[in-house]
Image: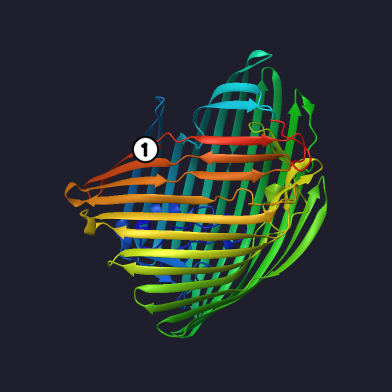
């Protein structure tokens, strides 16, 4: 249902610390789910369609609804009649090389009025994003062939995810509790067989193992006190990440071990007051404590290789206060104004000891103009502050690419002033087109800098990022396809920053110049069927290191699916994915040292 909404694209939220900045753009019964570990799209998949009364689209904000920083929200309204529903899903993935990998999920929901009890268990075993055969070709700076290899890479993801939630009236309000446990991991193995002009036939094997266990408990309590609605959210999460990698290149063995243990504690409280139908005020605050204990070690043939900041403990204490006013000026104008202020202290211990304190005001204005029922313009002005990735404080390495990244204890959050305008036009009853223009003036851009001769994340000064996004939803009845819908989206991005190595202007590392997708869906009621064709565009992503320029190119990807419902309680879904067997290509330009002064090596 969410995927078919005209003019709406699901945003599952950001993976950041804290609760406020991680919000997605879907509410359930007017409330945001009080969890971060459980992805919004997974929560939506577990809601049976028969439990949904309707889905409201909120554009530009309305009094009494926290827009969570978005300009458009979807609000899923659920039935409250007594019902029990259980869904069992069995999946069998069959791959072109003959392997069979089963998976499954069991969901349970019991709802009676304001009482809810739900749970799910999911097991998956499937290919990851980098699987198949390929080649590796290395040439010297003058073009002479150094290596010509053929290889194969295996990328297998497996895991178990458990979820549980309960909702019940309590102390005159509504209490919601949830818990989750993730036991996930990835195994990657990369084999190369190659010939070198002088050494003859050689081989290389790289094995990576990732483990990502974690858990979360949390809840929220809402109560009406007179004309004021109070809401309190509390979350506690713990997670562990380990990565062990071994490379054996014809007897030369390299070993890499990285890992961290991290946790987050959040307490958030808000109070909402609506003095009239056209005005609402919301104020509150959020406190969070985060920590990460990380370590890295690298050796070659048993000899340790020193890398800066290989061991670190990072802690953050952060608080935020805010006040939001939403005013429906008239039937055509709506204004949302937010005053926010964030204060934090980040300290590090380990190979380097440091402590930094930050204070950032973060105002936001959202003005909506609807001159007709079929056209709307939304303008947002906001100061955003990014969150530092604690993993950037600890050294890492990639034996497959040969890139070693040092940790950096001197990182500062990236800041940006954002001006965004969206033009939305409805036509043909359920058709919709949205044009979004966005400009970001960036301060303290986080990119790559040198630290003790190694690459490391760091601040490289000011920059800019400009985005044009076009979204189209088109019903196809007029073109002879009753029940058909075409949805397309395209995003063009241009960024600019001054390279700290060469002093020249260039794009910001890892920005994607273009991303897009087209989805064609058709319902065929007389056969109780729905078929879908989905095409994802090719992408190009470039990273500018101090001594390398790495570009990753992924070709377009085409998927088919067909769903058949022989009865209301049973559906059969067949999918054919990666029809184009799309390629993933990495290009590395490796210099003899700093790119600004030394020539290309290979």
Q: Is the residue 290 above or below the residue 96 in the image?
A: below
Say which residue appears at 63% left-offset and 22% top-offset: 147
Residue 376 location (% of width, % of height): 41, 73
**Label 1 Cα neighbours within 10 Å, binned few <14 / some 14-19 / many ≥20:** some
Say which residue appears at 55% left-offset and 50% top-offset: 512
Q: Is the residue 404 above or below the residue 386 in the image?
A: above
From the viewer's side, name the closer residue of 537 and 336.
Answer: 537
Quarter of the image with the C terminus is top right
From the viewer's side, name the closer residue of 335 and 159.
Answer: 335
Q: Is the residue 476 above or below the residue 422 in the image?
A: above
Say which residue appears at 54% left-offset and 71% top-offset: 380
Residue sitting at the far top: 200
Say which residue appears at 63% left-offset and 51% top-offset: 507
From the viewer's side, name the closer residue of 482 and 395.
Answer: 482
Position of residue 324 in the picture relative to residue 579 (left or right): right
Say which residue label 1 marks. Answer: 91
Visible residue check, residue 60: no
Q: Quadrant of residue 371?
A: bottom left
Residue 326 location (% of width, % of height): 51, 79
Residue sitting at the far left: 526
Q: Quadrant of residue 474?
A: bottom left
Residue sitting at the far front: 142
Helix, strand, or loop for circle 1?
A: strand
Position of residue 347 in the picture relative to residue 35 (left or right): right
Quarter of the image with the N terminus is bottom left
Q: Is the residue 374 above or below the residue 438 in the image?
A: below
**Model colouring:** rainbow
Residue 250 location (% of width, % of height): 67, 17
How many callouts does the rendering have? 1
């Amino acid at each position: 249902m969410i995927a078919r909404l005209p003019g709406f694209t699901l945003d599952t939220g950001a993976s950041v610390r804290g609760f406020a900045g991680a919000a997605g753009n879907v509410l359930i019964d007017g409330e945001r789910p009080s969890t971060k570990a459980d992805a919004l799209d997974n929560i939506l998949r577990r809601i049976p369609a028969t439990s949904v009364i309707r889905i409201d689209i909120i554009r530009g904000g309305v009094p009494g609804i926290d827009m969570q920083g978005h300009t458009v929200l979807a609000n899923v309204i659920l039935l409250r009649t007594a019902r029990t529903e259980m869904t069992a899903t069995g999946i069998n993935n069959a791959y072109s090389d003959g392997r069979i990998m089963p998976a499954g999920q069991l969901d349970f929901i019991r709802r009676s009025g304001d009482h809810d009890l739900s749970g799910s268990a999911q097991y998956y075993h499937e290919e990851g994003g980098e699987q198949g055969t390929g080649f590796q070709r290395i040439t010297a700076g003058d073009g002479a062939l150094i290596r010509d290899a053929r290889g194969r890479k295996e990328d297998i993801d497996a895991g178990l995810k458990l979820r549980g939630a309960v909702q019940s009236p309590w102390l005159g309000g509504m209490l919601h509790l949830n818990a989750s446990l993730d036991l996930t991991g990835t195994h990657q193995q990369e084999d190369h067989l190659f010939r070198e002009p002088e050494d003859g036939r050689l081989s290389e094997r790289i094995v990576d193992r990732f483990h990502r266990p974690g858990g979360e408990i949390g809840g929220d309590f809402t109560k009406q006190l007179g004309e004021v609605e109070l809401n309190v959210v509390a979350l506690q999460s713990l997670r562990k990440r380990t990565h062990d990698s071994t490379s054996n290149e014809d007897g030369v063995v390299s070993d890499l071990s990285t890992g961290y243990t991290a946790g987050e504690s959040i307490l958030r409280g808000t109070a909402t007051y609506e003095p009239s139908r056209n005005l609402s005020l919301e104020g509150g605050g959020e406190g969070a404590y985060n920590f990460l204990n990380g370590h890295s070690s690298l050796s070659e043939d048993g000899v340790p290789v020193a890398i800066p900041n290989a061991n670190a403990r990072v802690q953050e204490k952060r608080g935020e206060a805010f006040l939001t006013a939403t005013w429906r000026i008239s039937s055509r104008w709506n204004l949302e104004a937010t005053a926010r202020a964030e204060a934090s202290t980040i300290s590090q211990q380990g190979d380097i000891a440091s402590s930094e304190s930050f204070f950032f005001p973060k105002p936001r204005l959202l003005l909506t103009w609807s001159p007709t029922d079929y056209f709307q313009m939304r303008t947002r002005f906001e100061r955003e502050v990014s969150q530092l990735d604690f993993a950037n404080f600890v050294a890492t390495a990639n034996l497959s690419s040969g890139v070693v990244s040092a940790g950096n204890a001197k990182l500062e959050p990236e800041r940006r002033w954002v001006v965004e305008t969206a033009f939305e036009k409805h036509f043909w009853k359920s058709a919709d087109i949205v044009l979004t223009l966005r400009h970001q003036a960036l301060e303290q851009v986080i990119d790559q800098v040198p630290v003790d001769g190694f690459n490391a994340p760091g601040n490289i000064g000011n920059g800019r990022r400009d985005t044009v996004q076009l979204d189209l939803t088109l019903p196809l009845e007029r073109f002879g396809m009753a029940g058909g819908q075409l949805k397309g989206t395209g995003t063009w991005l241009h960024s600019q920053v001054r390279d700290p190595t060469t002093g020249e202007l260039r794009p910001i590392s890892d920005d994607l110049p273009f991303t897009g997708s087209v989805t064609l869906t058709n319902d065929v009621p007389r056969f109780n069927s729905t078929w879908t064709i989905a095409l994802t565009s090719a992408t190009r992503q470039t990273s500018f290191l101090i001594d390398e320029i790495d570009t990753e190119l992924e070709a377009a990807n085409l998927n088919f699916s067909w769903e058949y419902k022989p009865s209301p309680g049973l559906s059969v879904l067949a999918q054919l994915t990666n029809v184009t067997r799309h390629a993933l290509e990495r290009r590395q330009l490796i210099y003899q040292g700093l790119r600004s002064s030394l020539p290309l090596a290979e």
